[in-house]
Image: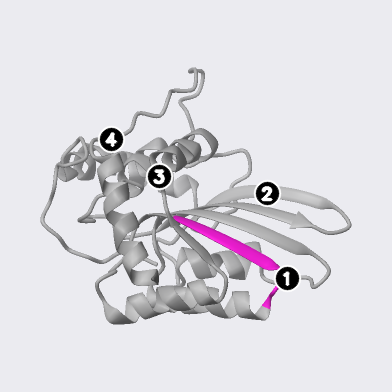
Amino acid sequence: MAEKQEEPSNTQNGEPDNAEEGEGKKKKKVKREDLPPFEIVTGERLPAIFFKFQFRNVEYSSGRNKTFLCYVLETQGKESTTSRGYLEDEHAASHAEIAFFNTILPKCESSVRYNITWYVSSSPCVACADRISETLRKNKNLRLTIMVGRLFMWEEAEMQAALKKMKSAGCKLRIMKPQDFEYVWQNFVEQEEGEEAKAFVPWEDIQENFQYYEEKLAEILQ
């Protein structure tokens, strides 16, 4: 699900948007050549510059026109396994949420229980929300929790209805707390080679923006 909202530039979360879109943009292009969309990341992590810009829980998502999806997939059957990685949907035919079910988990075995947690930069679009609801209804042995940084087009009636369908299908939809952003930083974001791991530094208004989106989601799902 790629965000296409065009809003006024804002500086409420640290650096101004144009600073990240300028010098930082050059770094992004270099990294994208090494990481094709939907590649399953093994032993590699999300570039810090992507996380700092794309995951910020700002109210106005200017310039954030794609989705990053970090996942933890746990299976319980004859053998228990845990895998993790991330997807991004730029330059791809489908959004990250749909790509997960097409590439990471194309089929659910009835004898296996699946517990999946997503940490996503923003909530799904209508089409992706419908696919999630359909998948959960068809696979009762699948449990999905989605932690989102922002709500996508939450004022639209169609979008609200799609989020309610997800809840009815059994999806646990949550807004990421500051502790969740820290978890993603520690477990999915790469550090500079040869350097000690850097502590997560919360941006300005991270708690306030979490509360804002949490209230909006509660109103939608009530």
Q: Give the x, y percent position of residue 128.
A: 46, 73
For badge 1, the amino acid type reads: Cys
Q: Is residue 77 left or right of residue 94?
A: right
From the image, tell me which residue sits under label 2: 83
* Mark 1 / mark 3, whichever is N-terminal: 1
Report if residue 141 lies within the magenta region.
Answer: yes
Q: Residues within 10 Å of mark 4 (few under 14, many from 20)?
A: some
Q: Give the x, y percent position of residue 25.
A: 27, 44
Q: Give the x, y percent position of residue 123.
A: 39, 63
Q: Residues within 10 Å of mark 1 (few under 14, many from 20)?
A: some
Q: Is residue 207 above or below residue 136?
A: above
For badge 4, the amino acid type reads: Trp
The image quadrant that residue 2 belongs to is bottom left
For badge 3, the amino acid type reads: Lys
Quadrant in which the C terminus is drawn: bottom left
Numbered label tally:
4
For badge 2, the amino acid type reads: Ser
Q: Nearer the viewer, mark 4 or mark 1?
A: 4
Per the image, label 4 sits on a secondary structure element best described as loop
**Can residue 201 be seen at all in this image of the molecule?**
yes
From the image, tell me which residue sits under label 4: 203
From the image, tell me which residue sits under label 1: 108
